[in-house]
Every structure is written in C-alpha cells, then in structure tokens.
Image (tube, rainbow, N blue to C red):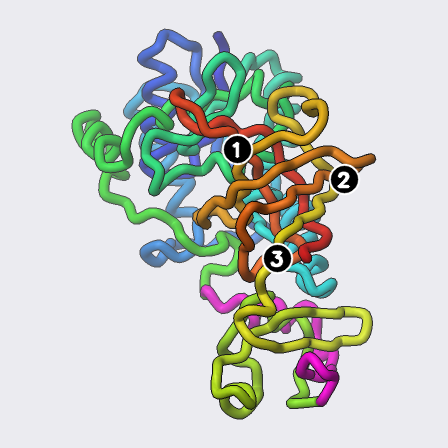
Amino acid sequence: MRVLAAMSGGVDSSVAAARMLDAGHDVVGVHLALSAAPGALRTGSRGCCSREDADDARRVADILGIPFYVWDFADRFKEDVIDDFVDSYARGETPNPCVRCNERIKFSALAARALALGFDAVATGHYARLTDGRLRRAVDRDKDQSYVLAVLSAEQLRHAAFPVGDTPKPAIREEAARRGLAVADKPDSHDICFIPSGDTQAFLGARIGVRRGAVVDAGGAVLAEHDGVHGFTIGQRKGLGIAGPGPDGRPRYVTGIDATTATVTVGGAEDLEVSELTGEGPVFTCGRPWRGPLDCEVQVRAHGSVAPARAELIGEELVARLSSPLRGVAPGQTMVLYRPDAAGDEVLGSATIAAAR
C-alpha cells in the first residue's frame, strides 16, 4: 500500500511513519507548511509548524530512508482554520481549531491531494484506533484524540491510518529513542499552533477590534462594559470586569453570549447546567445515521468528561438529551457521541453545538 505519512516533526508522527514502513508499505513523508511566515524556533510546548519542526521531520525521514516533501497549505489553513476560528469567536461561539484542521486540512485537502497522486492512505500520529473501519478511542486514554477526529466521514476514515493509537505515550517515546530518532524527548505541543504566544484574547482582539457591549446579570442589570464578546466563553469565571461575587456571595460565571447585541450575561454555577444539546452538520463516522433514539455517551471537550445521553437525528439536527447535566457547554463546540464497548469506546458521530439548554 502506498502511504503518505503526515510528519509534524514530533515524536508521534515520526513513530507512525516508522511503523508504516516496518509494516511493508511504500511510505512517503510530507510536512505541512501551515504558516506563510513560520517562526524559526519552537519554544517548548508553544505552538508548532516552525521551521525547526520541518527540519526535525526531514531528519527523521532521512533516518528512515523515505522520500520527504514540504507541501504549502498556508492559504488553505488561514481560510479554513484561522479565519473560521476568528469568525466563530466574533459570533460568540467557542470553536476547536484542531477539529477544523483535521476536518478541512489533514483529512480533506491533504487526503484529496494524496489520493489524486495515487496514495492509498494518509497516516498520522493521532492517538486513536481504527478497527474494521470503526473509529475508537486510543489505548492511552490520557492522550486519546478520537474527539478531534470524530468529524471525519466513513469514506475519509477508509483512507486513514493511526499507527500509534494502540500504544501508551511513554512507550512511543521509548520506541523513538531505540530507533535513534532525536525527537524522542521533544515536548508535546499543547497550545493553539497559530497562537504560539498563548494569548488568545490578544490574537482575537488584533483581528476583530473593539466592539463594546455590556456585562449584565440575569435580570438585565448592567454590571460592566466590555470591548468585545470575543473575550468571553461560556463558563468563564475570571476577567469579567465586575467587582466581586454575586449578591449571594458566590462566584459568577459567563452564562450567555449574544454577539448581535454584544451582551454578555453572568450568573451562578447552577445557571451553567444544560440537559439538552442540539448540533448542526452531523457527521456519522459509521457511514450512516442510526434509526430512532440511541443510548450513548456525549463528550463536548477534547479532554472533557462524558455524560450518558439519548441521541437522535431530528431533521438535519442531532439532538442529545443528557441523563445528567453538563456545565459550561458553548455553541461552536463539537459534541462527540461514543458507544462504550469491550473493544474500546467507538465513535458514532459528531455535530457542532448550535444550542444548549
């Protein structure tokens, strides 16, 4: 099988490429240039996609003895991931850029080019598993990335490979060291790759500008003014610009964001609880929706907890009714549905949250 290995320059994708080569596949490495002006160096776990990362990927490819290329996806990444991220925050939503990158770049634009060039599959260093075409959680639950892959269709998964999903992260580092790969001890990237400073509010403010509005309580009383709804997320407690706790002496949280009126509403922790989620643009990783209500588990953050739910497709929307409430769920987040089983939780599908109540 001809395999295109997406090599970020990190330890996971490096071992993934090596394992595909060991399995007897014809492997070619590719590094995605996602920035028009990448930084020269990467600072610890801040960001990724620097020139240093590209050089690390090239050195690994040289050790493995595989062809290596750098493909420029900077324009597509800006349009489909960065601009989408900014626009979503301007609408008062809370997006996950890693979800969009996997959906629109790695398994859409990249995979499409790979298939057009005659490759059979794209291999990545994601921590997830594929068994009989079914997407499942990784063995290492702490590193599991099935959440950010749940936006992939069954057809996209048919041309994907996740070679490290069956192994705990410490063992991947040990394997990289045994193979003589210098990236064995390279820190993981934990920040949004296109915001290496880690200052999301400054990044958004520079692109959205000042759009003043009010911070109000549940009764509509104005408590403070703000410079833009992009500075807030549902569930946020700090940086609200208000003095002290609520009248009951308890902390106050962002409970609602209305970008149309530039209004941010705050309330108590109990006001954050939701029991029903409505999602738009559902994707079913198994290839087709199920019939009628289905008992499952719902996850709304990449490393968040799950909640038992009953989900069904109503028209073109995916509705999940939770058995126990979740807190701090925001429009723009992705809800992912899992079916627990002995083989490892199976991903059933996903949708972008449009409403939570």
Q: Which residue is mark 3?
A: 274
- Asked if the stretch drawn in magenta spans residue 213, the answer is yes
Q: Which circle marks residue 317 in the picture?
A: 2
Badge 1: residue crowd in 10 Å (few <14, some 14–19, many ≥20): many
Q: Quadrant of residue 184?
A: top left
The amino acid pointed to by label 1 is Tyr
The amino acid pointed to by label 3 is Val
Magenta stretch in the rendered image? 198-221
Q: Which circle marks residue 163 in the picture?
A: none
What x and y, as percent, mark residue 130? 47, 20
Q: Quadrant of residue 185?
A: top left
- Asked if the stretch drawn in magenta spans residue 165, the answer is no
Query: Is label 3 in a helix, a strand or a loop?
Result: strand
Kindly check if marks 3 and 2 are in contact, taking CB atoms under 8 A apart as contact: no
Q: Which residue is mark 1?
A: 338
Q: Is residue 57 left or right of residue 134?
A: left
Q: Residue at x 28, y 36 (%)?
A: 169
Q: Residue at x 62, y 53 (%)?
A: 275
The amino acid pointed to by label 2 is Glu
Query: Is label 1 in a helix, a strand or a loop?
Result: strand
Query: 323 above or below 176?
Result: below
Q: Quadrant of residue 140?
A: top left
The residue positioned farthest toward the front in the image shown: 323
What x and y, as percent, mark residue 46? 39, 57
Closer to the camera: disc 1 or disc 3? 3
- Residue in front for this viewpoint, 118 or 155: 155
Decide which of tag 1 and tag 2 comes sooner along the chain.
Answer: 2
Q: Residue at x 67, y 76 (%)?
A: 265
Work out whether residue 20 can be spotted.
Answer: yes
Count of residue discs: 3
- Residue in front for this viewpoint, 23 or 352: 352
- Residue in front for this viewpoint, 273 or 88: 273
